[in-house]
Image: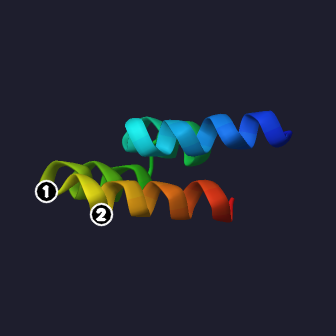
Amino acid sequence: MGACGSILMVILAIFLPPLAVLLQRGCGADFLINVVLTILAYIPGIIHALYIVLKY
């Protein structure tokens, strides 16, 4: 994934955190954790999504 794709993934992680995690890691534990974090509070969902996008 190039620089443009990485920037788009970061923007997606900010506005739609579960979708960014789903595209990056698939439908697994990371996705479910992010959905729960986003439902409980939006900011932890964003932080988790950014962590996943930037790590992988």
Label 2 sits on a secondary structure element that is helix
Q: CA distance from mark 1 to mark 2?
A: 8 Å
Q: Which residue is located at x 57 percent, y 48 percent?
A: 25
Looking at the image, which residue is at 25% across and 51% down? 38
Q: Is residue 53 left or right of residue 15?
A: right
30 in relation to 20, above or below: below
Q: Is residue 38 left or right of residue 49?
A: left
To which residue does mark 2 refer?
44
Location of residue 44 in the rendering, given as x and y in whole percent from the top left corner: 30, 63
Tag 1, which secondary structure? helix
Q: Amino acid at mark 2?
A: Pro
Residue 29 seen by the camera: no
Q: Are marks 1 and 2 in contact (CB under 8 Å)?
A: yes
Where's residue 39, x and y in %?
A: 16, 48
For mark 2, does the 10 Å Cα neighbourhood hold few (<14), some (14 to 19), or many (20 or more) residues? Answer: some
Dot label at residue 40:
1
Give residue 34's position: percent from left, percent from top.
34, 54
Residue 18 visible here: yes
Residue at the (40%, 37%) spot, across then down: 15
Q: In the rendered structure, which amino acid carries the disc numbered 1?
A: Leu
- Please name whichever residue, 37 or 30, is drawn nearer the observer in this view of the structure: 37
